[in-house]
Image: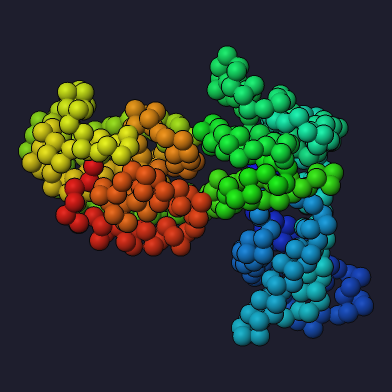
Amino acid sequence: MKKADFIINIALVPIDYLTVVLAAISAYYIRFSAGIIQIRPANFELVFSEYFHIILQIGLLATLVFALSGFYTMRSKKIASELPRVVSGVSTTVIFLILAIFFQRELFSSRFIIITAWVLAIIYLLLVRVAIILTKNYFLKKGRGLSPVIIIGQASDTDIIVEAYNKNKTLGYKIIAQYNNLAQIKELGDYKAFIKEKKVEYIIQTDSSMNKDEALDLLTFCQENHINLKYVANLFQAQSLNLELNSILGLPLIEIKGTPLDGWRRVYKRAFDFFLAIFFIIILSPFLIIISLGVILTSKGPVMVQLKRVGQKGRIFKMYKFRSMVKDAHLMKNEIKNLNERTDGPLFKMKNDPRVTSFGKFLRRTSLDELPQLFNVLKGEMSLVGPRPHEPEEVSEYQRGYRKLLTIKPGITGMAQVSGRSSLLFSEEAKLDIFYIENWSILLDLIILLKTPKALFKKDEAC
């Protein structure tokens, strides 16, 4: 998804609301204009202040209907596809309004105003979209808002795609480099720095004859470097559940989406996390105080610790936890690293870890030490539900394909935690988290949150 499309779809919500209100105001003044009154006298009285209060509410209803009708899907706007959507959305809103008038007689019942507002809303909304599309295309032609792209491939289709993107800036892409294969990118002195400096958003693979191993290498490379991948059809046929099909000059072009958690869904999840985190902090505040006192009274050191963890797209952040170990426990890790009881992956686990305090054992057994992570959620570094956050040293030892775990924000709880906790092998834990990433939904988040309290009080100690 191009950044320009995301910004446009976010901005459309308040713009559509104001547009509907404006259409309703216009209909009011047309109805009571001198010319219309002469042709069709008004047999009713409608005070503008009361009418204005009603249309503010109707504007909210319309915006909700528009959202459910797919107005704000994260795709480039085209008038051909917007017209039926606008007509359908406005018509649905009018139907709801007519039903409300039927059941509540206090509302205005002017058929002229309703029909005029319906027509004007459709016209205004379409004009807004035409203006947005023209404005967006203007800036794209000037080179503003283009998504940086790397082209990989030697097939004849390569020249077609390169020529199309170079000639038509309104497609939204800027080709910054072209290579025959992935190996050429890796041969660059510091390709990670190059990708970061150029802010590469997409790699487009144009060679449909690429073999399976090369295809997997490219997919893994894109996951590890947090780059979106597009490819000419017949490539990676079964590599992802989340595919989007487009075309350019007759060539079918498929985009692999690492997760459905994009665009508006990302906004929904952030709002869901933010408000629930505030709610939990308020409700659990007495427990937070009691646990803090327990930590202070049972061992020396700070109440909470800030642990380095790897978040979304490999960003390092400080994760908050109630201190369950002795002071400066991280300095002792190298001394006991050879006693690690997990041999299936990069995680460290030791059942009778000498660094854990007596009160800390209780906190870890019940996972109450993780409650301060609610503040990480407020800061936007974590989510309530997501993959388990890992240490930088652990991430550096990830096997091939595991970096997909960094596609989204890590969570306080997740599928791995409610499906077996620390008794799971790391590979099984990673598969569950990757399944969550590829199949995210608000409903899935709710199910995991509801299952979490039961998992918290299992006997096995969290690592």
Please tell me which residue is depicted at 29% across the width and 49% down the height of the picture. Answer: 424
Question: Residue drawn 58% across and 22% down?
Answer: 186
Q: Quadrant location of residue 45?
A: bottom right
The residue positioned 15% from the left and 41% from the top of the image is 351
Residue 116 position in % (x across, y down):
82, 70
In the image, is residue 125 above or below residue 185? Answer: below
Residue 101 vs residue 275, the one in the foreground: 275
Q: Is residue 199 left or right of residue 161?
A: left
Decide which of 310, 79 is in the foreground and name it.
310
Figure coloring? rainbow
Q: Is residue 298 above or below residue 190?
A: below
**Residue depicted at x 18% and y 38%:** 350
Res 251 visible: yes
Residue 211, x across and y down, in percent: 64, 38
Please state, as top left, top right, bottom left or bottom right, where the N terminus lies in the image. Answer: top right
User: Is 77 placed left or right of 36 in the picture?
Assistant: left
Picture layout, residue 294 above or below residue 49: above
Task: Tell me how many marks there are.
Answer: 0
Task: Return the x and y of residue 272 as percentages of the image width and height.
Answer: 45, 54
231 up-or-down from 17: above or below: above
Q: Position of residue 416 (x, y in %)?
A: 34, 51
Residue 378 at least partly seen? no
Position of 302 with respect to 126 (left or right) is left
Where residue 332 sits, quadrant-wise, is top left
Name the image quarter holding residue 156.
top right
The quarter of the rendered structure image containing the C terminus is top left
